[in-house]
Image (cartoon, helix red, strand yellow):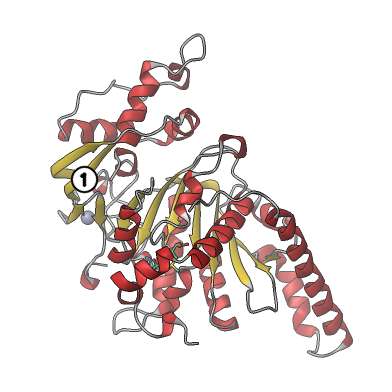
Amino acid sequence: MSRPEDTLPPDLFYNDVESRKYTTSSRIKNIQADMTNRALELLDLKEPSLILDIGCGSGLSGEILSDVSEDEGGPHAWVGMDISSSMLAQALDRDVEGDMLLADIGQGVPFRAGSFDAAISISAIQWLCNAETADVSPEGRLKRFFDGLYASLKRGGKAVCQFYPKNAQQRSMISNAAIKAGFGAGILEDDPETKNVKVYLVLTVGGGDVTGTVSGMNGVDVYDARRKERKRGKEFEKKGSKAWILRKKAQMEAKGKVVKSSSRYTGRKRRVAF
Amino acid sequence: MKLLTLNFLTCARKTCKSLPAAFPLHPREAELEQVETDMNAALIKNILPRLEWDAMKTVTTELGLPNLPAETPAPEDLATADGEPSQTLKDLHVLLMDTAVVSGKLVCGNCGHEYAVKEGIANFLLPSHMV
Ligand SMILES: C[S@@+](CC[C@H](N)C(=O)[O-])C[C@H]1O[C@@H](n2cnc3c(N)ncnc32)[C@H](O)[C@@H]1O
Ligand SMILES: [Zn+2]
């Protein structure tokens, strides 16, 4: 099946028909709810927070934020950005509680410094890799986005972006843009090596505890500058050598842990209502 | 666009974004709406220190709303002596969470760009020559 990202720009792909189809599919609702709950778990917010929802669409991710109970540190308030007016129209029809902007995240994030406690993005940022006109490149748009996102978060703030990279190159293009913007970054995979693999980019803003927050999470591969030494070590390993195989095995095991810990979470009650 | 959000929004143009004149955006021909929502005291308490109170005052004056106190309310003003939500907290809730610009424009004080608001959603898409 071809990726929608390779067919049309997002505002044209998510037209009225597609937006309605997307928003009314209970299969999609469930998947988006699961991923949003996972992102919330990674954000680990302790009090009702102001959250930016990047590529909020029709609010399937945002409404989960509004429904977090007091016991679990909610409910949160959110502001969404999306480039598709049809998706936002669906959100209006569904009376979501968030506030929304019609905006292209590749043009930046128009909020003053330190506005948000946290940000989430569910299934959106891979779209930034598909832009090729005379005046914009994917690299340029990723830079505008991550620079703007970094500035809009308060110090100690976090962002979790679940995305669907087309390949390893897109995955590292996106992580590298985040790191260049100043984030401490890690990647977490749920259900690795399956066709349902879910990739989460976990980002932290300053506050001294950059690697701390990310590496404290089971199975998160840290992409922080302070881990360079480990990476450098890697270069001396020959691909396929015993050391290389052992390290790969350890990595797979680490990822296996993530799967396990996510099944603990799978048992928790969901707050998605139909 | 809730007044809460307006207190964080800036002009989207790169040349404006960090300039003082690009914040707050100024509502013009604005139609306001008030929708009652559940009070979330902890959220207001969390956000209060982050509000730019002067911008809050500018925007409410421009919208023809009643005058705000001169200074940001203090955290201890949010609850009464017996721990109940104070009038200050209720007023803040209505102002920030329940009051929204449903239509009109938001205008940058630096470049003059007008962001249209329809059905409560502001259009921040920039033509590529303005990015
Ligand atoms: C798969 S939907 C996800 C929507 C929502 N987060 C959810 O979980 O249901 C992807 C969304 O990303 C939005 N999007 C894609 N590129 C964008 C961009 N450059 N700026 C803003 N939104 C974008 C699309 O319009 C679409 O609504
Ligand atoms: Zn401007």
Relative side of A222 to A169, left or right: right
Residue A105 x %, y %: 37, 64
Residue B53 x %, y %: 32, 31
Relative side of A175 to B10, left or right: right
Q: Quadrant of the C terminus of chain B?
A: bottom left
Residue A28 x %, y %: 50, 66
Residue that protrudes farthest toward the front in the picture = A274
Residue that mark 1 sits on: B102
Q: Nearer the viewer, residue B7 or A45?
A: A45
Labels in figure, total: 1
Relative side of A101 to A4, left or right: left
Q: How crowded is mark 1: few (under 14 residues within 10 Å), some or many (20 or more)?
A: some
| Residue at the image position 28 percent from the left and 21 percent from the top | B70
Report ligand 1 position as a quadrant: bottom left
| Residue at the image position 44 percent from the left and 55 percent from the top | A53
Q: Nearer the viewer, residue B122 or A141?
A: B122
Quarter occupied by residue A54: bottom left
Is residue A57 among what the camera can see?
yes
Q: Can you tell me whether the CB of the residue at mark 1 lies under 8 Å from the nearest atom of ligand 1?
A: no
Residue A257 x %, y %: 79, 64
**Secondary structure at numbered mark 1:** strand
Up the image or down, A175 lies above or below B107; here it is below
Quarter occupied by residue A4: bottom left
Is residue A102 among what the camera can see?
no
Q: Which of A200 and A265 is in front in this view?
A: A265
Residue that protrudes farthest toward the top in the picture = B81
Up the image or down, B79 lies above or below B21; here it is above
Three-letter amino acid code at the position of disc 1 = Val
| Residue at the image position 45 percent from the left and 31 percent from the top | B40
Up the image or down, A215 lies above or below A166; here it is above
| Residue at the image position 28 percent from the left and 33 percent from the top | B56
Query: What chain is tagged by disc 1?
Result: B
